Image: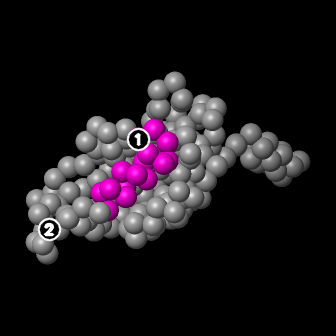
Amino acid sequence: MKKVFVYLSLIAFAACTAPEVVDTRVGFGGEDGSVGIGSQASVDVVVSLDAAWKNWDTETMSEFLAIDGEFSFDDGRVAEGSDAFLAIVEKEGSMDTSYSWDMFYAFSVNLENDTVGGEWVNAGFNVEGTYLEEVIEKTTFNEWYYVLDGKVTNWSSHKRKRNN
């Protein structure tokens, strides 16, 4: 009888002990609630867009941009729509100063109460501007991309000078 009581007590204790649930959402996004880890698919959109941009391939870039997107440059310019954005990219690609860069991180997050269904991707870039084969500018860019259905619908870019 004693063994039965101990056995039933152990079963009852085990049944009442639920595994601890780990909340994977942290921080906050205003009225959009807490922040969670997004998907690799959204990061892949940004990586593909960057690969096309490095080659100044605006046709391929357009595949990853929403036609009615909003694109905010670090200098305050705002391009309404992908055509306006790509026109600026083409103009910058034809200037005398050439730019090279590497993406050194990218991650995706989503907001708990986002009713649209997209994800934000944050990416960082080290950039060098060269004129007549001399490096004249070293900067780091921090960029945010809102990716919805495989297209960037919102983009903002911020930069700071690097000393190294």
Within-10-Å neighbours for mark 1: few <14, some 14–19, many 20+? some
Residue that numbered label 1 is attached to: 79
Q: Secondary structure at mark 2?
A: strand
Question: Which x, y percent locates residue 38?
Answer: 56, 50
Residue that numbered label 2 is attached to: 131
Bounds of the magenta span? 79-93
Q: Which residue occupies 51% across, 63% down?
A: 59
Identity, as a three-letter code, of the amino acid under mark 2: Tyr
Q: Which residue occupies 14% across, 75% down?
A: 133
Residue 31, visible in the rendered structure: yes
Task: From the image, give the main secondary structure of the stretch colored magenta.
Answer: helix
Quadrant assignment, res 36: top right
Q: Which residue occupies 10% across, 59% down?
A: 163
> Could you tell me if the residues under marks 2 and 1 are in contact, i.e. CB atoms within 8 Å?
no
The answer to if 81 sits in the magenta stretch is yes
Q: Is residue 80 left or right of residue 74?
A: right
Alpha carbons under labels 2 and 1: distance apart:
26 Å
